[in-house]
Amino acid sequence: MTPKTKSTILSLGLAALLAGCGHPSNISKDTDRITNAKMESMLDSNTDSPVHTIVMPHDEPAFSPGPGRDEFVTACVVCHSPRYITMQPRFSRTTWLSEVNKMKDVYGAHISDEQVLRITDYLVSINGKAGTGQGPKGTYGE
Amino acid sequence: MWADPLGQAIGIRPPRLCLCKGAVKFSMNREPTNVAGGGAYSISRRRLLQLLGSTGLAALASSCTRVNPAAGILASPTNLARFPEKTEMILLTDRPPQLETPIHYFRQDLTPNEAFFVRWHLEGIPTSVDLRTFRINVSGHVRRPLQLSVDELRSQFEPISIVAVNQCSGNSRSFFEPRVPGGQWKHGAVGNAKWTGVSVKSILDRAQVKPGAVDVSFNGLDAPPLPSVSDFVKALSIDHARDGEVMIACAMNDQPLPMVNGFPLRLVVPGWYGTYWVKALSDVTVLPQPFSNFWTDKAYRIPNAPNGTESPKDLAKDTVPINKFNVRSIFVRPDPDEVLHVGMPTEIEGIAFDSGYGIRRVEVSTDGGATWADARLDPEIGKYSWRRWRASWTPTNRGQYRLMARATNAAGDTQSKEQWNRSGFMWNVIQQVDVKVG
């Protein structure tokens, strides 16, 4: 993570995102995939308890290099995992731009118009369709 | 710094990451830390320690959004994943979770709780509920606002049970052409369960709705990740909410709901799409004016046209909130990759459902729709349940065959031959399954 990214996150008031993960590079990268069945053992199976608790597993996100990656990591992943991108088919730039604008204008993502374009660059680079053909404009997050 | 992983997990991070609404803690991130604190702490601490003893470092490594340029972002979206209280399910997204049921579970009339599909909208989903302090609040345009514990709900109102299909609005979205953005479900964002609880009518009667009520809104414990994001709240008309069938379920297939399916209480809206089945229901508000928010005004809308269909080249301007299920059927046998044999009887099987009129006929084709024959229908379980259909088929020649199934309900409605809308909702195109006879 670059210093620039960090400062952007802090400026968005999302310092909590960084808390407690100052030394992540010490850690094995492949052992914490979401399919780790051991997570299941964390389930509180005490059915007599009035307190019911689960512990959500966590899929370690990884981000391919590409234009706009910092903006994507900063502005998008705070609210949802990158699987929201990677589960989609390869969309045209038109569709991805529409999706990013939807996140800004409708869902309230804290991003500038410049960042919208940079994030769109990134989405097109990792999951875009060749050419500039028209694609459907996205609707609302259902 | 890892000498005390529990300290790392519990001591440092949670205060800033947990938004607490009363008794409930939220996962605003997705690591073990959120079990800490409050009533949940003493119960989970030992288990957390056990886990951290073996996989603690890995779990803690997950505690932040870390850039790892070496790993590929385009991991297969069809991974199987295991979430708390759930079996292995098809992973669409992990945060917030969207989990799809593998089709073979639909060979059972009631979908097991552990395999029932999961779909949340907002990152802040509840991960801990203390039933000693949890209350469902009934308020707004009523004379007697109520605050009820789950025990009071169970003991003070007449219990009702209903078997009903719950289906995501976007189930089968990945089959639309041209493709549309959204959860790329195949056919597994649906399930059938026996729901037990109390009718919303009985709750509202106790609360004494004032004259002039128009809508009733339903809010759950999930919370937006940013203040600028709209909370997920849905509403029904007062008449619909009081129809005696819309219910607040505290049990699913006679068991408590899994947390990710809405523990401790979930709204059940028989025959209507899952977007109305608010999970972890905490607030019922009676309104003297029409309800309005993003999730109703902008999201979950369909073209105001038959079967919610429109053309990609001419998008409908007139839209309405999505509402009742249309008619559809889904194959559960044979497996698509199963090789069938000449002269060997093969059982074809599927499920069909609608919004409550009831399935009256299912026809099956084994020749790509050229000819059709009636399938046998299993006895009806309930009008909001799905109904199983079966057909026997003995292939006479080798080769590729296209199986199709077409359901019709008691109102005479049947399935689409083609369909498209911009949001990928209400898919009910006649399914085609290509099989090989060897």
Image (cartoon, coloured by chain):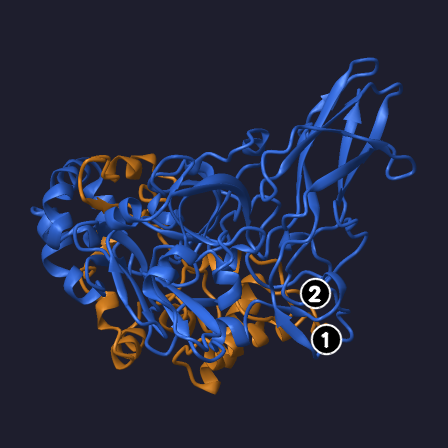
Chain colours: A orange, B blue
Identify the chain of the residue marked 1, using the numbered disc in the image. Answer: B
Q: Residues within 10 Å of mark 1 (few under 14, many from 20)?
A: some
Q: Amino acid at mark 2?
A: Asn
- Where residue B297 appears, as percent x and y from the top left, is 54, 76
Determine the residue positioned at 31% across, 44% down: A32
- Where residue A104 appears, as percent x and y from the top left, is 46, 79
Residue bearing the label numbered 2: B421
Q: Which image quarter: residue B386?
A: top right
Residue bearing the label numbered 1: B316
Q: Which image quarter: residue A70?
A: bottom left
Q: Residues within 10 Å of mark 2 (few under 14, many from 20)?
A: many
Determine the residue positioned at 52% across, 79% down: A101
Determine the residue positioned at 73% across, 58% down: B177
Residue A96 can be seen in this image = yes
- Where residue B435 appears, as percent x and y from the top left, is 76, 30
- Where residue A63 appears, as percent x and y from the top left, is 42, 60
In front of the other: A129 or B370:
B370
Mark 1 lies on a secondary structure that is loop
Determine the residue positioned at 77% across, 69% down: B311
**The C terminus of chain B: image quadrant:** top right
Among all residues in the image, which is located at the extreme top? B343
Mark 2 lies on a secondary structure that is loop
Q: Which image quarter: residue B336?
A: top right
1 or 2: tag closer to the N-terminus: 1
In front of the other: B410 or B426:
B410
Q: CA distance from mark 1 to mark 2?
A: 9 Å
- Pointer 1 with pointer 2, Cβ within 8 A: yes
Left or right: residue B129 compared with residue B45: right
Reply above or below: A141 against B246. below
Reply above or below: B237 against B340. below
